Image (cartoon, helix red, strand yellow):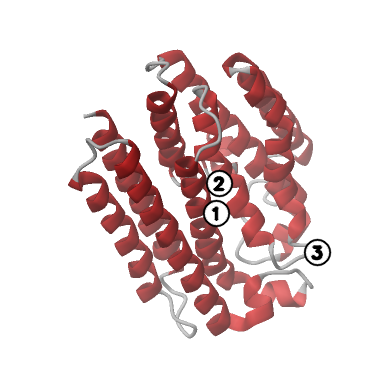
Amino acid sequence: MQSYFSLIKFSHTIFAMPFALLGFTLGTLQSGAGFNWKTLGLVVLCMVFARSAAMAFNRYLDRDIDERNPRTKIREIPAGVISPKAALMFVLANALLFMATAWFINPLCFYLSPVALMVVLGYSYTKRFTYLCHFVLGLGLALAPIGAYLATGGGFDLIPLCYSFAVLFWVAGFDIIYALQDEEFDREQQLNSIPVVLGRGGALRLSEILHLLSATMILLACWQQGLQFPHFNWIHWGAAAVFLSMLFYQHTLVKPNDLSKVNLAFFTTNGVASLIFGTLVIVDVLF
């Protein structure tokens, strides 16, 4: 089981989960349906199943590429820890569990579940034909807040859409930073990425622009929350300040000629940013 947790990088669930929980909390208030532990549990399970299917499928599809890349050849499938067939069965099981869980939430979530799977599974193909692959990954994680909002019976609304766009730009931006590590390998293998097209300097500039857009969406969402929920106070603005500070900080860690702190910028700063922001805003909403 530990090998499968490693295969899907389960700890990286921290990126989108706080935004999903935030979408659930806001949807509960907006719909007036009241807090429901069962629905919350189903939303969390949907997140886990969808992400597990997506990550395992990415590892399955990229197994030959990972075997040729010195950085990734120790991953579970190329290293022989998990067989390709077992990984594919794991993908299928999680995809079916995701759709079944969505069925128990409400009909709309169930009908939209195949669309969500197409996005999160389809990402794995994109590096083969477009440098916009980072945006497809961002789109996959951006489904979390709006999906959790819909799970509570809420309709499409500006606030969860703002959070979804914030996640899209945020994830695309930090995935570009992460992809800097494979720039030379991707170019040799004729794989597509922003660093291959723009080079390290250009990729970092684009990442900065995307994170500026993400910050704008976060501030817009906070402003709209203040209009819809007058009891909001300084806590959610403080949460936004922390998130924006973490966005700025990660760009001080990575330079075109120094990629030694990419992992710190990728996982630590973004994980902290998401966890603190989601927790503080939920606390502000509820209390």
Cα distance between the residues tagged 2 and 1: 5 Å
- Tell me what residue is drawn at x 42 percent, y 16 percent: 33
Cα distance between the residues tagged 2 and 3: 22 Å
Three-letter amino acid code at the position of disc 2: Ala
Of badges 2 and 3, the one in the foreground is 2
Q: Give the secondary structure at mark 2.
A: helix
Q: Is residue 80 above or below residue 99?
A: below
Q: Give the secondary structure at mark 1.
A: helix
Q: Quadrant of the C terminus?
A: top left
- Tell me what residue is drawn at x 26 percent, y 46 percent: 236
- Tell me what residue is drawn at x 44 percent, y 56 percent: 217
**Residue 217: assigned label:** none
Q: Viewer-proximal residue, 178 or 88?
A: 178
Kindly indicate whether the residue at mark 1 contacts the one at mark 2 (C-beta within 8 angstroms).
yes
In this figure, which residue is indicated by the disc labeled 2?
A: 142
- Tell me what residue is drawn at x 48 percent, y 58 percent: 170
In this figure, which residue is indicated by the disc labeled 3?
A: 129
Quadrant of res 80: top right
Q: Give the secondary structure at mark 3.
A: loop
Q: Residue furthest left?
A: 234
Q: For label 2, count other residues whose C-alpha is less than 10 Å away and answer few (under 14), some (14-19) or many (20+).
A: many
Residue 201: x, y in percent? 53, 84
Q: For label 3, count other residues whose C-alpha is less than 10 Å away and answer few (under 14), some (14-19) or many (20+).
A: few
Three-letter amino acid code at the position of disc 3: Phe
Q: Is residue 55 above or below residue 175?
A: above
In this figure, which residue is indicated by the disc labeled 1?
A: 168
Which is nearer the N-term, disc 2 or disc 3? 3
Of badges 1 and 3, the one in the foreground is 1
Q: Is residue 77 above or below residue 101?
A: below
